Amino acid sequence: SFPGVKALKSVNFSLEKGEIHALLGENGAGKSTLVKIIQGIYQPDDGDIFLDGKKVTIKDANHARSLGIVGIPQEVSVFPDLTVLENLFIGWEPKTNFGFINWKDMERIARQKMEELNINLPLKEEAGRLSTAQQKLIQILKSLIQRARILIMDEPTTSLTTEEIESLFSVVKRLKTSGVSIIYISHRLEEVFRIADRVTVLRDGEVVFSDYLKDVTPEDLVEKMIGRKPSEYFPSRSFEEDRDILLRLNNIKFKFLEKVNLTLFKGEILGIAGLLGSGRTTLAKIIAGFLKPEGGEIYLNGKKVLFSSPYDAIKNGIVYIPEDRRVQGLILQESVRFNLSLPNLDIIPKKFIIDVQKEYDIARELISNFNIKVPNPDYPVFTLSGGNQQKVVLAKWLFREPQVLIFDEPTIGIDVGTKSNIYHLMARLADGRKGIIFISSDFTELVGVCDRILILKNGEITKEIKREDATFNEHRVFLEAAGINQTKVGR
């Protein structure tokens, strides 16, 4: 437990030899806490850990490694200026009889382990020059050199291409065959069903489900993770397009954007779909005042507006929730209270200076309303899970009660439960006559949430798809975004 928060509650978890055991749960469910206890980073308040049937007390991370327990974090962790070979053996260098580093032994062992896993890494190359996938292989290979018996993999496929994921899965399966046991943490259910033998689901620090995957369906896992039926994953929507127009773009031009026309109604969730480089984020930043259009007009509630800055757009009730919350949406080293207050200093009551008590009251209210899992408002944001960080971003902007909210890839790196909460939040905002612009590369979620979807391709809006259309589905959205002729595809 942490001050004010009980992170885990009587958790029972087992791992068999040569097993891949998936650990699932929403952000903040307790997954990270559990594996950090197994790695010796945290000490449990209560309970026992058994290894090979014998009770052990894992004192720290070095002790865990000596027991064969090795963790591979989500973010790659290599020394970029050292060679691959140096990275593999740092702290574990074999020595000659005279106490010098035995480079020949290092290379021999490295090549033997690479052969076991059927991988090839340039041992003399600086690690920083390698791809993300290759750097992750360095960490896996290093764990074998450290004689890992239990490998903890946290979101291992993050930032990898489809081909790189396939290569990683091949390596993971070879590890399993060699007798290594793996705890596999992932938000991607399709990966879990492909790679894992067993699954355990945590929710609010408790085990709510554990079983072999052959006896489980994806719908079972979603329901266990989010605490609601899969049919309730997306909100039910009914929208009438004859409502008042809230926002209108008329012939907007900016660099490669060409004469973009867009209408957003009060109470509408409007999706923007397009492939990478289509201009989605550029368009969002024009609406939010980050970029000034080279041509065209923007109308808000029927009045022509020209925003000189993002703050100008904010004052007019338009807020932008950026794609990269860690870089653009938050100041990670600062507290939750600081991040919630920063964009709202102009509307927080003052007594010559900011009323600190009122600031704390507002922070506590937002933490409660948005179910942000944090012990107190003064905790730094970087300590929060990805889902809770996103809740801080949403809370700070919604406190201003904006008219238009632009969500740019809001569910990237978020668990299924928090995703569902964000979808339902959008629906509630739209029901309150707010206008929502939803940008996403996940066409399934656009179809699940939006009333209309506009296709942006090469800087132009090429198609409008409405919920009432017979072909309102992710397949059609993809074909339109990719510019594929549906008639030819259907033949």
Image: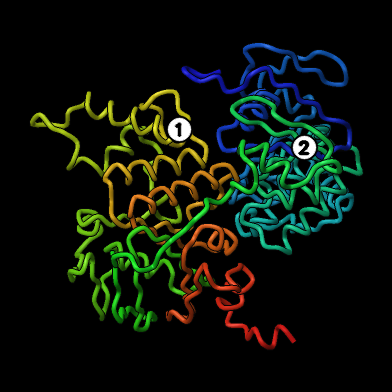
Task: Identify the image quadrant of the C terminus.
Answer: bottom right
Q: Which kind of residue does numbered mark 1 sit on?
A: Asn
Q: Nearer the viewer, mark 1 or mark 2?
A: 1
Q: Taking 464 as reference, is 231 above or below it?
A: above
Q: Residue furthest left?
A: 352
Q: Residue at x 69, y 46 (%)?
A: 86
Q: Earlier in the sequence, mark 1 or mark 2?
A: 2
Q: Taking 99 as reference, is 455 above or below it?
A: below
Between 277 and 465, the one lying in front of the other is 465
- How far is disc 1 from disc 2 in space, using C-alphas? 26 Å
Classify mark 1: helix, strand or loop.
loop
Q: Taking 79 as reference, is 38 above or below it?
A: above
The percent position of residue 34, horizontal first and vertical second, equals 66, 27
Q: Which residue is mark 2?
A: 199
The percent position of residue 212, horizontal first and vertical second, equals 84, 37
Q: Which residue is mark 1?
A: 371
Whether the residues at callouts 1 and 2 have beta carbons within 8 Å, the answer is no
Between 392 and 489, the one lying in front of the other is 489
Which mark identifies residue 52? none
Q: Residues within 10 Å of mark 1 (few under 14, many from 20)?
A: few
Residue 291 is drawn in which quadrant? bottom left
Q: Taking 413 as reference, is 62 above or below it?
A: above
Classify mark 2: helix, strand or loop.
strand
The percent position of residue 412, horizontal first and vertical second, equals 54, 53
Q: Which kind of residue does numbered mark 2 sit on?
A: Val
Relative placement, left or right, of 29 versus 356 is right
The percent position of residue 135, horizontal first and vertical second, equals 67, 52
Task: Identify the image quadrant of the N terminus.
Answer: top right
Residue 260 is drawn in which quadrant? bottom left
